[in-house]
Image: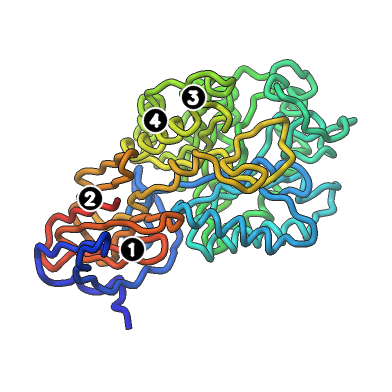
């Protein structure tokens, strides 16, 4: 029988544990039980679980294919369950711990007053399947240029009088935010005080939050992806409309509320949005390099690019989780761009979800951002995302490094609490070489559990 992961520390200071590799003798291990997944809560700028461990969110968005019918991050006919299991099983091998899950109001209520329960059951199954594999989820109300009739996604077409037929064949779709007066008018109607669309939206979200917020694995809700001011002045709108919108939403749920900024600000790297009031706020902006989006060479200093978001999170005293970061997969710098982002998340101590993970032959507006190709093969980006990191840290970090060339991750920390530290060790890699001082370990599929030795004041672990 395994000892509980919440039990006393192992004894024997200075024990070095080395995984059997290349003929080396296997050193003593200790049996550690992995604690059950819990909800997450805020501790200033840190996300913690119920055991007091600092949680690092590393994940992907699920995904671009979910923006249009049949509204899933993979193609299916009558084999949804099988396709879903394959989709989630693959994600679990990458060692990630987060899925930001695209929710479509158009799919959930394609006709006014007539919800599609079949879609909601499929959505529930995705959330439940992720939780069963130890993945946390964020329910993301996704929209781009408002609705499918504008070559976008998200809001139902019935919220727009005389909406064009749905389509997703616009390579420069984002230009419509500025060039299409009908898109601006739709947002103006949505944000209008006392408007019918906002009233219907609030009813939809009230029902969605009641259904999903307490579901296992769901850590939070994102009220709107890349909100747009319509024809309003952006800075005035952020202060007078968007911040109160988030504040009102935060009052309706105990779940974490992920606050996104405009798509423009995701490229700009800063926002004028003041901190929305609420004790459950997480700053969740996006980060896109404009040159990289159009095939150019992205800037090398990703840490410097994300630093302002880290600083704003500190100013707001909230955690930062970059809701989207990505690059077209055919950009020759795609893999190194992903590598730099993962290094930046480590350096800044913030979370992030890559855009995106779909398995589909049909692309939304010609965008190929998916880290898995239509034929099911993985792109080189996956090699950079599937890497060791401290998934749940029971203690205070002293140093963390990762060498992409050797794929060697090292961490030193001062231990605290009774729960084990969890290090991601992606199971898509055949084996890992592990060394530790001041601790014993237990290797489990996709995870290395670390327990400090009795009396240890510092623990060091390397995973290669």
* Contact flag, marks 3 and 2 (Cβ < 8 Å): no
* Contact flag, marks 1 and 4 (Cβ < 8 Å): no
Q: Residue at x 59, y 63 (%)?
A: 128
Task: Tell me how far mark 3 sits from mark 4, CA to CA.
Answer: 9 Å
Residue under numbered circle 1: 51
At mark 4, the secondary structure is helix
Q: Earlier in the sequence, mark 3 or mark 1?
A: 1
Residue 459 x, y percent position in the rendering: 17, 56
Q: Is residue 248 visible?
A: no
Which of the labelled discs sits on residue 285, or is there none? none
Of residues 117 and 438, the one drawn nearer to the viewer in this rendering: 438
Residue under numbered circle 3: 271
Q: Earlier in the sequence, mark 1 or mark 4?
A: 1
At mark 1, the secondary structure is loop
Residue under numbered circle 4: 312
Residue under numbered circle 2: 396
Q: Where 301 sits versus 111, above or below?
A: above
* Contact flag, marks 3 and 4 (Cβ < 8 Å): yes
Q: Earlier in the sequence, mark 3 or mark 2?
A: 3
Q: Where 377 sits versus 88, above or below?
A: above
């Amino acid at each position: 029988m395994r000892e509980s992961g919440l039990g006393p520390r192992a004894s024997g200071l200075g024990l070095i544990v080395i995984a059997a590799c290349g003929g080396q003798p296997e050193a003593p291990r200790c049996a550690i039980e992995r604690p059950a997944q819990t909800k997450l809560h805020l501790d200033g700028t840190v996300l913690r679980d119920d055991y007091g461990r600092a949680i690092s969110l590393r994940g992907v968005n699920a995904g671009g294919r979910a923006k249009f019918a049949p509204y899933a991050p993979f193609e299916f006919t009558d084999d949804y369950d099988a396709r879903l299991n394959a989709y989630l099983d693959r994600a679990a091998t990458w060692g990630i711990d987060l899925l930001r899950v695209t929710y479509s109001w158009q799919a959930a209520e394609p006709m006014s007053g007539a919800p599609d329960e079949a879609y909601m059951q499929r959505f529930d199954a995705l959330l439940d399947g992720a939780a069963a594999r130890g993945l946390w989820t964020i329910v993301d109300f996704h929209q781009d240029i408002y609705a499918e009739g504008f070559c976008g996604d998200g809001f139902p077409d019935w919220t727009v009088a005389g909406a064009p037929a749905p389509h997703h064949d616009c390579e420069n779709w984002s230009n419509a935010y500025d060039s299409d007066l009908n898109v601006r008018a739709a947002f103006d109607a949505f944000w209008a005080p006392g408007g019918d669309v906002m009233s219907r939206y609030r009813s939809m979200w009230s029902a969605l939050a009641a259904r999903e917020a307490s579901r296992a694995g769901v850590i939070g809700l994102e009220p709107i992806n890349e909100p747009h001011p319509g024809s309003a002045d952006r800075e005035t709108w952020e202060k007078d409309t968007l911040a109160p919108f988030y504040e009102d939403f935060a009052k309706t749920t105990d779940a974490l509320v992920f606050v996104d900024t405009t798509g423009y600000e995701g490229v700009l790297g800063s926002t004028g949005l003041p901190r929305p009031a609420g004790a459950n706020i997480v700053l969740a902006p996006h980060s896109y390099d404009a040159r990289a989006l159009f095939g150019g060479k992205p800037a090398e200093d990703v840490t410097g690019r994300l630093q302002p978001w880290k600083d704003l999170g500190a100013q707001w005293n909230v955690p930062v989780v970059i809701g989207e970061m990505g690059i077209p997969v055919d950009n020759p710098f795609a893999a190194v761009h992903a590598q730099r982002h993962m290094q930046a998340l480590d350096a800044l101590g913030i979370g992030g979800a890559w855009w995106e993970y779909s398995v589909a032959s049909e692309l939304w507006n010609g965008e190929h951002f998916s880290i898995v190709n239509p034929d099911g093969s993985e792109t080189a980006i996956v090699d950079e995302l599937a890497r060791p990191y401290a998934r749940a840290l029971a203690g205070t970090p002293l140093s963390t490094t990762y060498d992409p060339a050797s794929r060697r991750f090292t961490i030193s920390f001062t231990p605290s609490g009774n729960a084990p530290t969890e290090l991601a060790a992606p199971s898509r890699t055949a084996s890992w070489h592990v060394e530790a001082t001041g601790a014993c370990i237990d290797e489990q599929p996709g995870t290395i559990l670390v327990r400090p030795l009795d009396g240890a004041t510092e623990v060091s672990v390397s995973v290669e």
